[in-house]
Amino acid sequence: QKEVEQDPGPLSVPEGAIVSLNCTYSNSAFQYFMWYRQYSRKGPELLMYTYSSGNKEDGRFTAQVDKSSKYISLFIRDSQPSDSATYLCAMRAGKLIFGQGTTLQVKP
Amino acid sequence: DTGVSQNPRHKITKRGQNVTFRCDPISEHNRLYWYRQTLGQGPEFLTYFQNEAQLEKSRLLSDRFSAERPKGSFSTLEIQRTEQGDSAMYLCASSHDRGYEQYFGPGTRLTVT
């Protein structure tokens, strides 16, 4: 079993839809939870991070962490074609431990 | 540009050849990480440096792989006797000592034929 599990998709939604991306993890010691966005042929860029449990909002993006269920989510509101990318969840344990990534396509 | 840079961006080599990649981190960052990413997968940790000291190595880093950061600035990753299974994107990231954010470079895409 991988430490971090993420549905690879692909996920295709119409412009303006609400997108929900999810990961589960097995190590209860994880404290920092991150979402990276990766465009094709580019390195990952940090989108959001959350420390411990709770919600964090940044514009159209909301990150949620439920440590009791070992489950994290990223919600994208009013999705745009420019949001089309691969979204990677990651847990920080010094190094980063990534999920497989979910490929999202937002169609105009 | 003050971001992480990696060279070369692409490398095609024949099986059995040696290759070396370079990473230049953000100048004030003490920590430097190497990851490998294969198609359809998330990046996997290989190794990291605190200044010039290599503090952790993944079991993915076989004896054919060696990484250095001689003066605590740029780093090199060498793969000896390349195999087709080494084909991947090699990503470098850097961060402050206690910073949560790792800044990634654009990666070096290696193809072993």
Image (tube, rainbow, N blue to C red):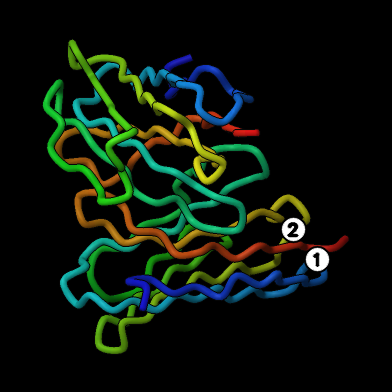
Q: Is residue B10 visible?
A: no
Residue, disc 2 = A80
The amino acid type found where label 2 is placed reads: Gln
From the top left corner, tell me how far across and down residue B104 is, in percent. 43, 35
Pointer 1 indicates a residue of which chain?
Answer: A
Residue, disc 1 = A15
Q: Secondary structure at mark 1?
A: loop
Q: Is residue B14 visible?
A: yes
From the top left corner, tell me how far across and down residue B108 is, in percent. 53, 29
Q: Quadrant of the N terminus of chain A?
A: bottom left
Exactly how many numbered labels are in the figure?
2
Q: Quadrant of the C terminus of chain A?
A: bottom right
> Looking at the image, which residue is at 50% across and 76% down?
A22
> Looking at the image, which residue is at 26% across and 39% down?
B47
Q: Are the residues under badges 1 and 2 in a single subunit?
A: yes
In the drawing, does residue A36 fall left or right of residue B101? right
- From the viewer's side, name the closer residue of B2 and A41: A41
The residue furthest front is: B16
Tag 1–tag 2 contact (CB < 8 Å): yes
